Image (tube, helix red, strand yellow):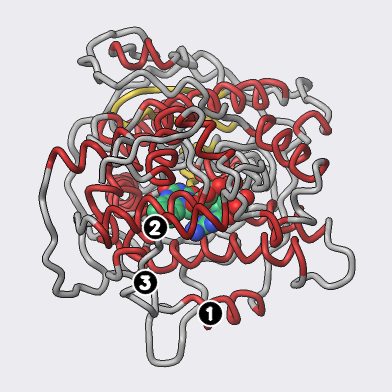
């Protein structure tokens, strides 16, 4: 997929040797609305442009990159956000996946004559400094819905407004824009099925091809992309070495690798083993490798969800909503659903969406046993050990392990969600908190008292114990509860 386009080196790039410093604090102004669509992406502008990357690390179907590439030179910037790196829920698997995705993206940009500039610190300040360094009047980015992304967007919008720079936000984080579908009389769908109906009928945008040629500004240090150990130790891409160590745990030994190329390899392998055709029949079977395992690639935008939907539909025979393809596309709709819910309820990661009177319990030892996979409930323990071992958990096992924590042990969902966020490569505030709240009965489930019985779930989805043996060793398994 990534190699299918000729690299372009032919374009002459104007020298850009201005110093790239962080500007001082700027007076704050009212923030413009979050999603500002591009005014003109047709003609090649003489003015350089800046693209501030977020979780959109690909060259294909990247509306921001396509728009930024219409300028004669385009500075593509990724800022290792110091604030996000230091969140207690930022874990080693996700950071490692991010760094690998950035390395892959840098190679793809260079193959087209472009460059990935890497900095560490405050994205808004550094994006504005980049714009000033190259004389850009436009900064592009991808719109996102989480509270962190919106805060970042607002901070940048204020600075841009103060400096007369246009800030252009592009779609791409979802198949259907999180702000596109509204039920009559409400700002967002609270229940999945009506959302699914509206979603399937919603128009789709065209896919954007990757730019054939890019031209990076010259005379600026692109910055060294650190590996996980260097970043953890405090490395600065431009060599100042003044960041305190992060203190991340060691990554999971069998975690997935990031990157646009890797995501497509994974999908090709999934299709080749019949995963798409069999998806509805096999996706809940715990032992078989019957799901695509692309949630992390989607989270970091190594592929766009719109590309993934189009790819799946290309594999459909006649009936696009029946069978494996239909079931797979429905999962992408779940992802969009939680993004749309998060857009309307950005506190989804910290507050009950639908508060209910539950006598939540606190028991640090019990919580720790759940985290370590030592509850004595074999399917729950296997799920929790898969998490530590791979930075991934099968969806069915996530359901069972979360049900056990919130419904059986009655620990608040946020305890489980934080542990998942730290260890999952695909950790995503909208999908993670949305699913945790769904299971806790504080979210979008229409049956808030639903409990999954781990024994019955094991009998049904891991009848011969293959999945559990993989993470717990051969039976008999310890049963302490
Ligand atoms: C408690 C709990 C926490 C979860 N936390 C996350 C998370 O942090 N990040 C995350 O991406 N998913 C999360 N999920 C959803 C789901 O488990 C994963 O998306 C899925 O297991 C990823 O594996 P896959 O790529 O092989 O999925 P596939 O089965 O191949 O599905 C394809 C894609 O559809 C999307 N998808 C599938 N199921 C769901 C779902 N229930 N909700 C939202 N999107 C879905 C994912 O993007 C996934 O990659 C969570 C589910 C539960 C029950």
Mark before the other along the chain sequence, 3 or 2: 2
C-alpha span from label 3 to label 1: 17 Å
C-alpha span from label 3 to label 2: 28 Å
Question: Would residue 274 appear left or right of 169 to someone viewing this image?
Answer: right
Compared with 366, 475 (above or below) is above
| Front residue (pair 159, 66) | 66
Q: Quadrant of residue 388?
A: top left
Q: Position of residue 17 (x, y in %)?
A: 47, 15
Q: Position of residue 266 (x, y in %)?
A: 70, 36
Q: Secondary structure at mark 1?
A: helix
Q: Secondary structure at mark 3?
A: loop
Disc 3 packing (10 Å; few <14; some 14–19; many ≥20): some
Question: Would residue 98 appear left or right of 67 to someone viewing this image?
Answer: left
**Residue in the image at 62% along x and 37% along y:** 58
Per the image, the residue denoted by label 1 is 193
**Residue in the image at 30% along x and 49% along y:** 417
Residue 186 visible in rendering:
yes
Disc 2 packing (10 Å; few <14; some 14–19; many ≥20): many
Per the image, the residue denoted by label 3 is 450
Per the image, the residue denoted by label 2 is 145
Q: Nearer the viewer, mark 3 or mark 1?
A: 3
Residue at the limit of the structure toward the front, as seen here: 476
């Amino acid at each position: 997929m990534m190699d299918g386009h000729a690299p372009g080196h032919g374009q002459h790039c104007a020298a850009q040797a201005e110093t790239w410093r962080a500007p001082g604090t700027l007076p704050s102004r009212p923030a413009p609305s979050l999603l500002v669509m591009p005014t003109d992406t047709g003609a090649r502008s003489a003015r350089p442009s800046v693209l501030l990357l977020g979780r959109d690390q690909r060259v294909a179907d990247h509306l921001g990159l396509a728009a930024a590439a219409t300028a004669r030179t385009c500075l593509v910037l990724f800022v290792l956000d110091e604030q996000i790196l230091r969140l207690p829920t930022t874990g080693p698997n996700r950071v490692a996946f991010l760094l690998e995705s950035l390395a892959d993206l840098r190679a793809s940009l260079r193959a087209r004559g472009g460059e990935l500039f890497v900095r560490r610190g405050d994205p808004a300040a550094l994006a504005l400094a980049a714009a000033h360094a190259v004389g850009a009047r436009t900064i592009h980015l991808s719109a996102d819905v989480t509270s962190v992304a919106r805060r970042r967007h607002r901070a940048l919008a204020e600075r841009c407004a103060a400096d007369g720079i246009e800030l252009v936000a592009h779609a791409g984080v979802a198949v259907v824009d999180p702000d596109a579908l509204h039920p009559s009389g409400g700002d967002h769908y609270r229940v999945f099925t009506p959302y699914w109906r509206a979603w399937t009928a919603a128009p789709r945008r065209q896919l954007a091809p990757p730019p054939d040629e890019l031209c990076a500004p010259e005379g600026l240090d692109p910055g060294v992309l650190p590996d996980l150990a260097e970043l953890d130790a405090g490395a600065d891409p431009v060599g100042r070495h003044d960041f305190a160590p992060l203190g991340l745990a060691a990554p999971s030994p069998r975690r997935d690798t990031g990157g646009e190329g890797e995501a497509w390899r994974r999908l090709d392998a999934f299709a080749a083993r019949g995963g798409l055709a069999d998806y509805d029949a096999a996706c809940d079977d715990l032992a078989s490798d019957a799901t695509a395992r692309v949630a992390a690639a989607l989270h970091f935008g190594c592929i766009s969800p719109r590309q993934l939907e189009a790819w799946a539909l290309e594999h459909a025979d006649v009936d696009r909503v029946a069978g494996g393809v239909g079931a797979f596309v429905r999962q992408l709709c779940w992802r969009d659903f939680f993004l749309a819910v998060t857009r309307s309820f950005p506190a989804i990661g910290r507050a009950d969406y639908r508060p209910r009177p539950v006598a939540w319990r606190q028991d640090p030892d019990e919580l720790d046993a759940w985290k370590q996979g030592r509850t004595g409930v074999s399917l729950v323990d296997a799920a929790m050990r898969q998490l530590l071992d791979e930075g991934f958990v099968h969806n069915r096992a996530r359901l069972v392990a979360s049900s056990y924590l919130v419904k059986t042990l009655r620990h608040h969902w946020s305890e489980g969600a934080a542990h998942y966020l730290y260890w999952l490569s695909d950790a995503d505030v909208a999908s993670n908190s949305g699913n945790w709240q769904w299971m806790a009965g504080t979210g979008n489930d229409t049956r808030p008292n639903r409990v999954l019985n781990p024994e019955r779930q094991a009998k049904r989805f891991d009848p011969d114990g293959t999945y559990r043996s993989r993470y717990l060793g051969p039976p008999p398994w310890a049963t302490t509860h």
